[in-house]
Amino acid sequence: MLRATHLILCLFLLLSGCTAINTLELQNAETLGSGKVAGMYGVGIGPDIPNLYRDSSWTMTDALSIPYLIGRMEVGVTNTTDASITAWTVATPYLLFGLAAGYFETVDAGVGLGIKQMLFGGEGEPRKMAAQVGAIGYAAKWVFDEHFFFDSTNVAGIYGSYGLNGGLCYTWAFNTSSVYLGAKATWLYSDETFVAARDYQTVLKQVYDDRVFWTPYIGWTGDGNNRRIALELSATIGRNPSTNRTEAMAFLGIGVRVNDMSGK
């Protein structure tokens, strides 16, 4: 199973896009335990959040469906509290050719800090619930349309966002596997500047966005050989600023976690 998971992750590395928020948890409500350290890597597929309602014709319709890479480090602060740092990106060599998403990014990175607090359910108990809070930031530069960066007719963009999130997760554990579900809310402020691609200085227009995204999710985990595989399906629900309607788009993710890297 782990070998197949590694193959899937390698295939996703060939694609590209950009997403401002990492909607996936890829973890259940269980905490690590005091002093333990875990590391996770994975991939998510879903809409391009900066263009959540804008397609390649610059009309507010559909988002691009793209994969993004995820990595996370977790530390057990106490037996019931974990702290984590998460990073995600879609930057791959294929971005240089403007493939897949129709444009490429020269810079693309997101970082999130989080705290998970177990509310009830200790070690060995089948049912657990945890609360999670965090903060995120994201930045990207991109070039619009399938042209090289030195094409002076291109439109480029500088995108930045930051936000806060919080939510609840509930878990049913079964021996070495579990099913979990939860929901979280992310307040995201975004600032996107459209510029001439050659110099990144000639400003064409600016777009500001201040929205709350709601994310229900459900997933499965399986443990073996100090590793945990997580499969998750989630939905991002937000208001379409052009129609003032609430719309939703789906995300799918897979992750592999080393359960304990502390050597204890």
Image (cartoon, rainbow, N blue to C red):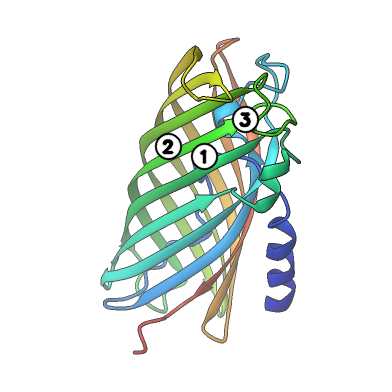
- Identify residue for label 1: 215
Residue 30, label in figure: none
User: Where is residue 249, by image quadrant?
Assistant: top right
Q: Residues within 10 Å of mark 2 (few under 14, many from 20)?
A: some
Amino acid type of the residue that numbered disc 3 sits on in the rendered structure: Val
- Identify residue for label 3: 143
Label 1: state its secondary structure. Answer: strand
Amino acid type of the residue that numbered disc 1 sits on in the rendered structure: Thr
- Choose the circle earlier in sequence order: 1 or 3: 3
In the image, residue 7 above or below residue 236: below
State which quarter of the image contains the N terminus.
Answer: bottom right
Q: Residue 133's x, y, as percent?
A: 32, 47
User: Where is residue 30, by image quadrant?
Assistant: bottom left
Q: Residue 240's x, y, as percent?
A: 57, 18
State the CA–CA distance, disc 2 to disc 1.
Answer: 6 Å
Q: Residues within 10 Å of mark 1 (few under 14, many from 20)?
A: many
Q: Residues within 10 Å of mark 3 (few under 14, many from 20)?
A: many
- Identify residue for label 2: 185
Q: Nearer the viewer, residue 167 or 112?
A: 112
In the image, residue 169 above or below residue 204: below
Look at the numbered discs 2 and 1 and tell me whether their residues touch, using CB distance below 8 Å. Answer: yes
Q: Residue 211's x, y, as percent?
A: 44, 24
Residue at the (35%, 60%) spot, across then down: 84
Determine if residue 182 is in view.
Answer: yes
Q: Nearer the viewer, residue 143 or 228?
A: 143
